[in-house]
Image: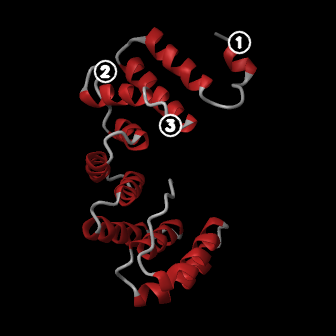
């Protein structure tokens, strides 16, 4: 799951938040949660603390609590795109694709050219080949500031859209462009069979 950083609003919690993020990143999830809970009890109005707690609960297998915390974030701070995308990822992983799609639409209302949100929404609710969101994804490719990873994701999503439409040559062009946007090589035996 993407772990974009939601910003801390309580300066006193900065050190504890940093420690909890390090523990979480190193796989010490229970220790991260133990470190963050006292600070969260004092500052339940801090989206960054709630975010780290949600990620901890998620990784500990308590999806219900994690989703509830992400809901608090998206309701109290609806302008936080990362809150919407994380809630969408958790909802999708939990099988609630309707909630996931709704959250991604909220994220796209705030960040219309978010490639990761467009790609995720296309996975959940496939775009029609000539639809507005497909055109938006094409338009994103024209952005010179697009990262290599975003370019690869966009081309792969467009390839799947073309493939679903039965346009295999167009799909192959996008898959080829996605490959060109990546470091490394595909396995030789897989590409030589073509």
* Helix, strand or loop at mark 1: helix
For marks 3 and 2, give the one nearer the viewer.
3
| Residue where numbered disc 1 is placed | 192
98 in relation to 184, above or below: below
Measuring from the top left, give residue 120's x and y in whole percent.
40, 42
The crowd level at tag 3 (other Cα within 10 Å; few <14, some 14-19, many 20+) is: some
Q: Residue at x 36, y 52 (%)?
A: 95
Mark 1 in CB contact with mark 3 (< 8 angstroms) = no
Mark-to-mark CA distance, 1 and 3: 27 Å
**Picture quadrant where residue 121 is located:** top left
**Picture quadrant where residue 68 is located:** bottom left
Residue 40 — which label?
none
86 in relation to 53, above or below: above
136 in relation to 170, above or below: below
For marks 2 and 1, give the one nearer the viewer.
2
| Residue where numbered disc 3 is placed | 150
Mark-to-mark CA distance, 2 and 1: 29 Å
- Mark 3 or mark 2, earlier in chain: 2
The crowd level at tag 1 (other Cα within 10 Å; few <14, some 14-19, many 20+) is: few
């Amino acid at each position: 799951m993407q772990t974009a950083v939601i910003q801390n609003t309580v300066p006193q919690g900065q050190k504890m938040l940093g420690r909890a993020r390090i523990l979480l990143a190193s796989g010490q999830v229970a220790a991260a949660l133990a470190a963050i809970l006292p600070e969260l009890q004092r500052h339940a109005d801090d989206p960054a603390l709630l975010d780290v707690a949600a990620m901890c609960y998620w990784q500990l297998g308590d999806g219900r609590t994690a989703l509830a915390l992400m809901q608090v974030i998206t309701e109290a701070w609806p302008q936080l795109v990362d809150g919407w995308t994380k809630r969408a990822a958790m909802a999708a992983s939990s099988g609630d694709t309707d909630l996931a799609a709704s959250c991604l639409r909220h994220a796209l209302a705030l960040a219309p050219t978010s490639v990761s949100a467009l790609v995720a929404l296309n996975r959940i609710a496939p775009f029609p080949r000539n639809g507005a969101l497909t055109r938006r994804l094409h338009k994103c490719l024209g952005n010179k500031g697009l990262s290599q990873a975003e370019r690869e994701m966009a081309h792969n999503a467009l390839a799947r859209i073309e493939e679903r439409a039965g346009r295999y040559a167009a799909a192959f062009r996008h898959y080829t462009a996605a490959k060109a946007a990546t470091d490394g090589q595909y396995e030789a035996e897989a590409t030589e069979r073509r």
